[in-house]
Image (cartoon, rainbow, N blue to C red):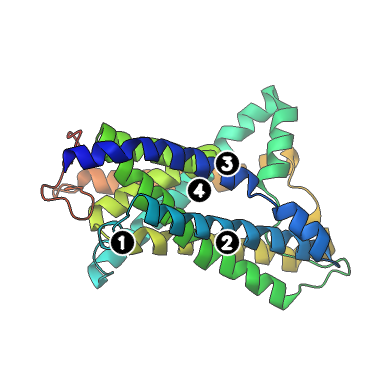
Amino acid sequence: MASEIASRLPRVRYCLLAILVLWYWAPGRYEFAYHWIEGEWYRFELAAIYYMQGTMALFILFMAFWVRLEPARILGRGFESKDLAPTLLVLVMTFAASTVLIVLFHIPVSYVLPDFVEWWLAWAFYPIIYVASDGSIPVLANLLNLVSLVVLAPLIEEILFRGYLLHRLAQKWGLWVGVVVSSALFGAVHPDTLAAAVTGFGLALLYLKTRTLWAPILAHALYNLLVWFWELHGAVVQGADYHESYGIEHLRQDWWVGVVALIVLVLIVDRLMRRRAPLGPFALPGDVRPSGMDDQRS
């Protein structure tokens, strides 16, 4: 068994490289959109997103055959009612931590590196609610985008980063190295890199605690749904002005959002630290011996 796992490890490197290349490049997505999509800008954007997600889904199928992934081991058991509480807890914690990093980290940086922060804000806060040139909000296009955010993205990303990479990295370097590296890679493919990495870490812990991939999939979906509704509120209020970039001045005016998120995060962490029951054990689905926080291997 050990020799079989060792023989598969070189494939992990190739799959990891392929994930990063496909994620950033998705061969042909812009050419496809330019040649086949006409009309409003959001049609082009929606086609490119679905093309990329379709490419990643095909890659997952190919990868499952090439490295012989075991769906039962990756998915773990089914979602149960007892998993709802930790799922919601991780959702609130990751949302609060991400907000703290986005707001309270970038505000001081904006005074030192304003050009960088302005560029990053234009990239990271790209509109996710589609508003037509006449100020209307197209229902079908936004529903398709909602499906992409709340269904496709959580399934694809959790299978890749928590389901596949975490398992393979843990086999080579140990459980907690696998958690950190897979979370860092999850952050690397998102524009809000630090916030996404922290979110990935929280989702990985949720996966290890519940030993079912359906828990982080649900938390991921609810996270994206919260962001979508937040953006929808902004689009309804601002109308055609919604396309205006979220700049440094907007960021500095939202300092209070970061403060509120920090207070929420501190209160939750304090409550967890006061608990008598330990947070563990943590283990991947299918592992015989659960791991504590001090273990390096599961």
Look at label 3 and name its amino acid. Val
Dividing the picture into quarters, in which one does residue 158 lie? bottom left
1 or 4: tag closer to the N-terminus: 1
Look at label 1 and name its amino acid. Pro
The correct choice, above or below, for 253 with respect to 140 in the image is: above
Judge by depth and name the residue closer to the eye, 266 or 183: 183
Residue for point 67% across, 48% down: 125
Q: Quadrant of the C terminus?
A: top left
- Depth-wise, is mark 1 or mark 4 nearer the camera? 1
Q: Is residue 38 left or right of residue 7?
A: right
- Residue 227 is marked as none
Q: Is residue 212 visible?
A: yes
Residue matched to label 2: 54
- Residue 71 is marked as 1
- Residue 21 is marked as 3
Identify the element where label 1 is drawn. Answer: helix
- Depth-wise, is mark 4 or mark 2 nearer the camera? 2
